[in-house]
Amino acid sequence: MEQAPTQKSTAKPAGSFEKKLRYTLRGIVRDRYLYLILLPCFVFYIVFIYRPMWGLQIAFKDYSPYLGLQKSPWIGFENFANFFNGPYFSRTVINTLMLNIYGLVFAFPAPIILALLMNEIKNRMLKKTIQTIVYLPYFVSVVVVAGIVINFLAPTQGIINVIIEKLGGTKEYFMVKPEYFRGIYTAMHIWKDTGFNSIIYIAALSGIDIQLYEACIIDGGNRWKQFLHITLPGIMPTVIIMLILKLGSMLDVGYESIILLYQPATYATADTISTYVFRVGVLENKYGFAAAVGLFNAVVALVLVFISNKISKRLTDTGLW
């Protein structure tokens, strides 16, 4: 007589949770000094990142500083509707996207190219000197950099217009021409940030095993073959991660430098979501409306990060998580 097959019990042992808890507590006690080092960072995020999220509710309120956060009247999605139906929605979104596309096409590859060029310099003294020169602009205040750009492009004594005049051209006031703003903004940030942003790619290049290059040389590979089959695949995971982060911030640009460069004559191409939030929230005291615009920006950025990460994982098996 055949016996009916017995089902395996899926219930966990009674003491499994207690064992895991004891193991976790032992690990915390063992690594207590490492957790103590981590504690300031944890407290910083709790106090300055997560705790202020409670204030996001003002995006759904007609917020008044006199009434406070709790007593301000709840208006639901009215602030969002006013932004979506307002006259500046399409302009600010398009300008923000265009500035980020300029940055993605021109500024994003610049530190990669610089890192690859720096990697080819074999003289250590020359390499250190060039690195110092290209890193310095990053540590200059954006206010100073914007002032340099404005002076260089000044219509009378600006060096760019002086050169144009010497070559037989006509002087122009570049800073009041909307069609020039995106190029000026992108070029300024390429000059300021490329050197510092190349550090991460230089670090990725230094992590490539030198024996791979030696093996390629033995197999008859020239410099182009070395770059194509060793250097490029070696830094590609880093490039993908940085690209995902860049795509996630497609609706975010540094409003400080834009405010320093733009003026009402260039609003057509220079007014972005962040500068609009600054004008409405700070100058016009519409805090709830500005919070709604900022929350919309953050939600779109989160969605873009998830989408770009999923596409990257599917195509390259590399992602943030």
Image: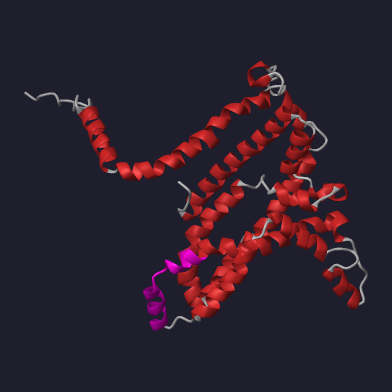
- Identify whether 188 is placed above or below 130: above
Locate the N terminus and report the quarter of the image it occupies.
Answer: top left
Which residue lies at the image location 63% right of the left edge and 25% below the top edge? Answer: 57
* The one of 309 and 183 positioned closer to us in this rendering: 183
Which residue lies at the image location 62% right of the left edge and 65% below the top edge? Answer: 136
Q: Quadrant of residue 64?
A: top right
Would residue 86 be visible to someone looking at this image?
yes
User: Bounds of the magenta span?
Assistant: 202-219
Which residue lies at the image location 71% right of the left edge and 42% below the top edge? Answer: 274
- Identify whether 289 is placed above or below 177: above
Which residue lies at the image location 47% right of the left edge and 68% below the top edge? Answer: 205
* The one of 36 and 296 positioned closer to us in this rendering: 36
> How many numbered discs, if any?
0
* The one of 171 and 298 positioned closer to us in this rendering: 171
Task: Tell me if 118 is positioned left or right of 256 in this view.
Answer: left
Q: Position of residue 54 (x, y in %)?
A: 57, 27
- Colour mode of the rendering: secondary structure
For residue 214: magenta? yes
For residue 61: magenta? no
- Identify whether 254 is placed above or below 62: below
Would residue 80 be visible to someone looking at this image?
no
Q: Quadrant of residue 74?
A: top right
Q: Position of residue 60 (x, y in %)?
A: 67, 24
Task: Tell me if 15 is positioned left or right of 273 in this view.
Answer: left
Q: Quadrant of residue 91?
A: top right
